Amino acid sequence: MVTEAGSALNEKRRKFFCLLRDPQVTTIIVEHRDRFARFGAEYVAAALDAGHGQMVVVDDAEADDDLVRDMTELMTSLCARL
């Protein structure tokens, strides 16, 4: 089990990258997809699927409207830079 608290926008998440590099890891369980990775979570899921792994999202409730989700991601990105 690996836990890591921090921003999903942080590109220097050591534990996260170690987890992805470990060939013995077959399942990654995340509480919320947007807390796992603001952008590119689908790419990680696809890479895991290609390597016979899987990503399980416990709470998959997301904003239904694409525009709302995009604006939320944009605002989060801008606030993180501040």
Image: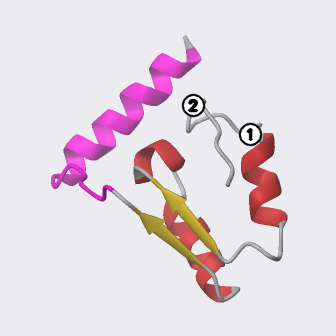
Magenta stretch in the rendered image: 59-81
Type of amino acid under label 1: Arg
Kindly identify the residue that appears in the image at 24 percent across and 54 percent down.
61
Look at the picture and state if 40 lies above or below 46.
above
Look at the picture and state if 61 lies above or below 46.
above
Q: Report x, y in % for residue 35.
A: 47, 42
For numbered disc 2, what is the local secondary structure? Answer: loop
Q: Quadrant of residue 53?
A: bottom right
Circle 1 crowding by C-alpha within 10 Å: few under 14, some 14–19, many from 20: some
Disc on res. 67: none
Give the alpha-carbon distance from disc 1 to disc 2, as whole Å: 9 Å
For numbered disc 1, what is the local secondary structure? Answer: loop
- Looking at the rendered image, the quarter that the C terminus falls into is top right
Disc on res. 13: 1
Circle 2 crowding by C-alpha within 10 Å: few under 14, some 14–19, many from 20: some
**Which residue is situated farthest in the left direction here?**
65
Magenta-drawn stretch, dominant element (helix, strand or loop): helix
Of the two numbered discs 1 and 2 on the same chain, state the one appearing first in sequence: 2
Please give the count of numbered marks on the rendered protein.
2
Kindly identify the residue that appears in the image at 77 percent across and 37 percent down.
12
Type of amino acid under label 2: Ser
The answer to whether residue 48 is seen in the rendering is: yes
Q: Quadrant of residue 10?
A: top right
The answer to whether residue 37 is seen in the rendering is: no
Disc on res. 7: 2
